[in-house]
Amino acid sequence: LHLSLRRQRQMCIRDSYCLDGTLPGYWHDAPTTPSSDWLLFLDGGAWCYDAQSCEARSREFRGSSRHFPARYWPYSGPMSANPTLNPAFAGFHRVVLGYCDGGSWLGDRHAPLLSGGRPLYLRGKRVLDAIIDELLATTELKSAARVLWSGGSAGGLYRSVRVGAGLSPQSGFCESTAAARDPASVTKRLSFR
């Protein structure tokens, strides 16, 4: 997998940044055979709770794309590319959206928060919107037949709060429904702006 940082054009349009002001990014692993199916995983990793914890987080992997590795794929299960282990989703495009805002992808604070003289950007919603816009502009996501939204920890919470029922996160806050237990029903065609 290769890290893809968003382009300057999208950053200017969305005014989206990681906590420390770096551009957000994502990792995309294309399937070995052509596919119009996509699995989008909102990465998680807890939260920051106040200016001090957000400032500390801004110096690490979950608060700055400066610390994003070039290759990153710590997931298995529905995220595995091995068709023996994952017959339902192994042939999907797999995308991990880098979590770098500390607020479950939900923040949309206009003015940066100052902590120790450093600006902190609480703009997870804008980060997510910009990454989706980037994927739509630069990949085949715009012509996807099926999209599975998933997430872990803070990403699972976002998925549950904002995307809606009928889709199942890999982890995080999960609905206990028959649909969430049936892999055939968790894929859904989504239309983007």
Image (spheres, helix red, strand yellow):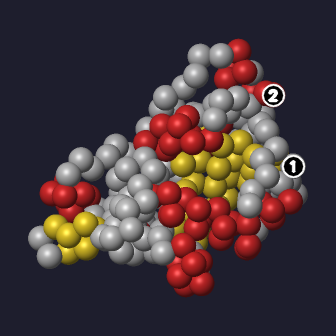
Residue under pointer 1: 145
Residue 159, horizontal then vertical, whole percent = 56, 40
Residue in view at x 82 percent, y 44 percent: 189
Task: Assign a secondary structure to mark 2.
Answer: helix
Q: Is residue 106 something that shows in the picture?
A: yes
Farthest residue, direction left:
116
Type of amino acid under label 2: Ala
Q: Is residue 5 visible?
A: no
Q: CA distance from mark 2 to mark 1?
A: 14 Å
Q: Contact (CB < 8 A) between labels 2 and 1? A: no
Badge 1 amino acid = Ala
Q: Tell me what residue is drawn at x 14 percent, y 76 percent.
A: 117
Q: Quadrant of residue 84?
A: top right
Residue sitting nearer the eye, 104 or 87: 104
Q: Is residue 124 above or below residue 173?
A: below
- Rendered residue at 16%/67% (across/down): 115
Residue 57 location in percent, x, y?
Answer: 26, 58
Task: Name the quadrant of the N terminus.
Answer: bottom right
Q: Earlier in the sequence, mark 2 or mark 1?
A: 1
Find numbered disc 1 in the image and state the secondary structure of the residue it sits on: loop
The dot on residue 184 is: 2
Task: Residue at 79% x, 27% y: name it.
Answer: 185
Q: Is residue 152 above or below residue 3?
A: above
Give the x, y percent position of residue 11: 53, 78
Front residue of this view, candidates 9 and 110: 110
Point out residue 83 in the picture as x, y percentages from the top left corner.
Answer: 76, 38
* In the image: residue 183, left or right of residue 79: right
Q: Residue furthest front?
A: 110
